[in-house]
Amino acid sequence: MNANGSSEHGPRQGASPDSGSVGIVTPQDYTFGSTGEGIELESGTRFGPVTVRYETYGTLNAERSNAILVAHAFSGDAHAAGYHSPNDHHAGWWDSMIGPGKAFDTTRYFVICSNVLGGCQGSTGPGSINPETGKPYGLSFPVITIDDMVKVQCKLINHLGIERLYAVAGGSMGGMQALEWAVRYPERMRSVIIMAATSRLSAQAIAFNAVGRNAIVSDEYWNGGNYYDGDPPARGLAIARMVGHITYLSEQAMGIKFGRRLQARADFGFDFEDQFQVESYLEYQGDKFVDRFDANSYIYLSKATDYYDLGARFNGLEHAVAGCSSKFLIVSFSSDWLYPPYQSKEIVFAMMRQGVDVSYVELESSYGHDAFFLEIERQAPLVSSFLEGLDG
């Protein structure tokens, strides 16, 4: 980990606006559909209206051919780059990759990032007001999937008047969305960039998600998901975050950053208070997460990642990618034990057997799953050269 710390799904301390940032950005909203309409979810339910919170960086060219959609990870949001005000000290979650002269060069590309369906940062989710009741949806919000998120993103891209994207890119859950784009809308993009992702979760990853959800619903303030008029299930959500955060790191990264060092004491206290630095760090991450995320969204989005199994929907991964016509760059990280490299290789091998144009890189890294946020110096040139090569 770096000195600032990081989390796959949290606001990141960024550079100042004069160091290659896109500068001040303003979130925008797009709403479509009426009550009971909008989109047909994978479950078969018709759902609407839907509001999509999004941000854009750079300029769309006259041909509308330079747009790149960036999909965010589990608890990310539409704020991928820049700052929301001159006093904002936190840049967007991928500010190190998006901006003038960066991997997603905003002097060349028009970059779009939207908050996913089911999220809690401006797009319609369980914390949004149900127009039929005038109250938050809570658990009456329909169960959603990665496929549903992509359908909503496609509505946004249509709204922006873009017929074909230059690229769709994302890491982790964002990588799942990028893969789904390539399969569902193969004619809608030239290229796809997938980082630290998978076509399906392992039993271990599903288990960690289950622990997080159980921590939330066991909280005394859970109230069946109807907590919006009172205290939220803050402790349960914080514990869910702590569990999730462990999966984003590697044993080596945690050893380097914390080891067995004690926190503000010279020896064991022989009590049950937090004593090790790693304990205090996880408590901090959990408490900070509660301030910006909705517990219901955690439940819905984690279930959406559990459900994602691209190969199962098409009677095998090879059949799923057979119709892909985009050029792919797939990147994995050696110490990622949440979505380990073998899962990326499964996608790559399936594509190779189907003649899909795919490039694959496994980067040696000690950062674990969070590496796609941290290994900028090595992954940025890969992305830049890949995108530039599309016109070669």
Image (cartoon, rainbow, N blue to C red):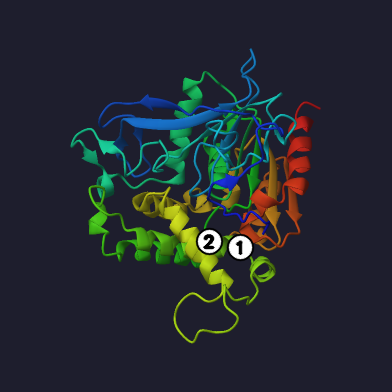
- Residue nearer the viewer, 42 or 99: 99
Q: Quadrant of residue 61?
A: top right
Q: Is residue 240 visible?
A: yes
Q: Residue reaching furthest left? A: 133
Up-down relation of residue 124 to residue 312 (above or below): above
- Residue 70 relative to residue 40: left or right: right
Disc number for residue 185: none
Q: Is residue 174 left or right of residue 347?
A: left
Q: Position of residue 89 (x, y in %)?
A: 57, 40
Which is nearer the eye, 354 or 40?
40
Measuring from the top left, give residue 178's x and y in whole percent: 57, 41
373 and 166: which is toward the camera: 373
Give the image quarter of residue 329: top right
Which percent across, then down, holds residue 69?
A: 58, 32
Quick one: label 2, few (<14), some, or many (20+) residues within 10 Å? Answer: some
Q: Which residue is mark 1?
A: 249
Q: Quadrant of the N terminus?
A: bottom right
Q: Residue furthest right?
A: 392
Residue type beneath disc 2: His
Query: Residue 245 has which mark?
Result: 2
Residue depicted at x 81% and y 27%: 392
- Callout 2 touching callout 1 (CB < 8 Å): yes
Classify mark 1: residues with Cα within 10 Å, few (<14), some (14-19) or many (20+). many
- Number of numbered discs on residues: 2
Name the element at disc 2: helix
- Marks 2 and 1 sit apart, C-alpha to C-alpha, by 7 Å
Q: Is residue 335 above or below residue 68?
A: below
| Drawn side of residue 261 relative to residue 218, left or right | right
